[in-house]
Amino acid sequence: MSSLRHNWKTEEIQAIHDKPLLDLIFEAASIHRENFDPQKVQVSSLISIKTGGCPEDCSYCPQAARYNTGLEAQGLMKTDAVLEMAKRAKNQGASRVCLGAAWREVKDNNQFDQVLDMVKGITNMGVEVCCTLGMLNENQADKLKKAGLYAYNHNIDTGQDYYKSIISTRTYDDRLNTLKNVQKAKISVCSGGIIGMGETKKDRIGMLTTLSNLTPHPDSVPINTLVAVKGTPLEKQKEVPIWDLIRMIATARIIMPHSVVRLSAGRNSRRAQDQALCFLAGANSIFSGEKLLTTPNPEFNEDKELFSLLGLKETPAFESSQREKKQPAFESSQREKSQAASLTQ
Ligand code: SF4
């Protein structure tokens, strides 16, 4: 079985990333099958509980108050309304509900208390709850854990060297520090990044190097492609070629074999055959539902059609981290290999 490593070198990752494409996909697909049921894809739904008006300057983000994107800022949603949306998402097949707030950081105030109530309420519905609320200290992470939070998303966005070209209002180390606080609270870590922001291949490999050297690896690794929004500094960026996305997904699958790799933002413009290749290369999670925070995303019924076409099914809640369930499949494949070897001896 593919073993977990936390000492990947940049050159090693680059060599994997640059393999002939079909070899890369084959290797990633094989590792995917050793570690996961390849028919299962986790379906998450993302609710923007507080939209826009963010003081940060992330160049890709229409929610940054300083960019003129025409986005209408909205305060924190009422808890009942969020619970209602979460219930609908669950009924449509989501096993994870993510709550996103356009904040720089969590503050110990009444709004955080409301978020804790949302987390409790949605956890009681029997789905995984993930939050993405900005920077977090240890105490706040503990409070979220006590409220039942399953996962926390905090992306490192890109490679360390390129990070300062994209965001100036907080540092790479700030990001890593929040991830540490989440890990300490024993909350599942969701962390990945975005490609298509003008970064080089070296920056992309740098991002994967950082993620794969975290101990443990993030449980979920979202690979986003930029959705260029008018009014943001990155509005003129071209869409990332599908082959670049597939290479990133396959490389993430190979170097972090136990992590759920999420085919994330930017999926709306991809054809079914493009997405099929991403699943083959090891992606096993998506966001479903008409909007991904503020940008368009495939609706639940479109994804149901896609799943039916490809013979995929939704991963039930709380199963993606129970990898021991896949052990028998691996053991039988190992048995087959040893039987084949003994026949040739
Ligand atoms: S990505 Fe998050 S932190 Fe950055 S501007 Fe957007 S909402 Fe704010």
Image (cartoon, rainbow, N blue to C red):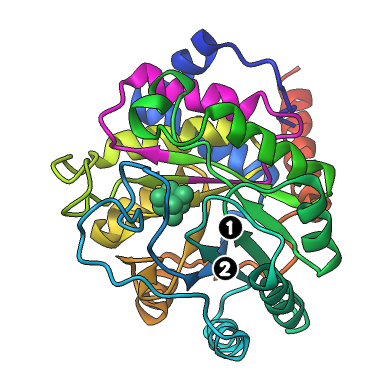
Q: Quadrant of residue 203?
A: top left
Q: Mark 1 — residue? A: 133
Q: Are marks 2 and 1 in contact (CB under 8 Å)?
A: yes
Q: Amino acid at mark 1?
A: Leu
Does residue 176 sit above or below 35 in this rendering?
above
> What segment carries the magenta color?
194-222
Marks 2 and 1, Cα distance to the nearest angstrom? 8 Å
Q: Is residue 54 within the magenta segment?
A: no
Q: Quadrant of residue 288?
A: bottom left
The residue that appears at 78% across and 82% down in the rendered structure is 124
Q: Mark 2 — residue? A: 99
First-in-chain label (2 vs 1): 2
Front-lying residue, 253 or 101: 101
Front-lying residue, 327 or 111: 111
Does residue 256 sit above or below 118 in this rendering?
above
Q: Position of residue 1 (x, y in %)?
A: 74, 32
Is residue 332 visible in this depiction of the protein? no
10 to the left or right of 145: left
The residue that appears at 76% across and 17% down in the rendered structure is 345
Q: Position of residue 102 (x, y in %)?
A: 47, 60
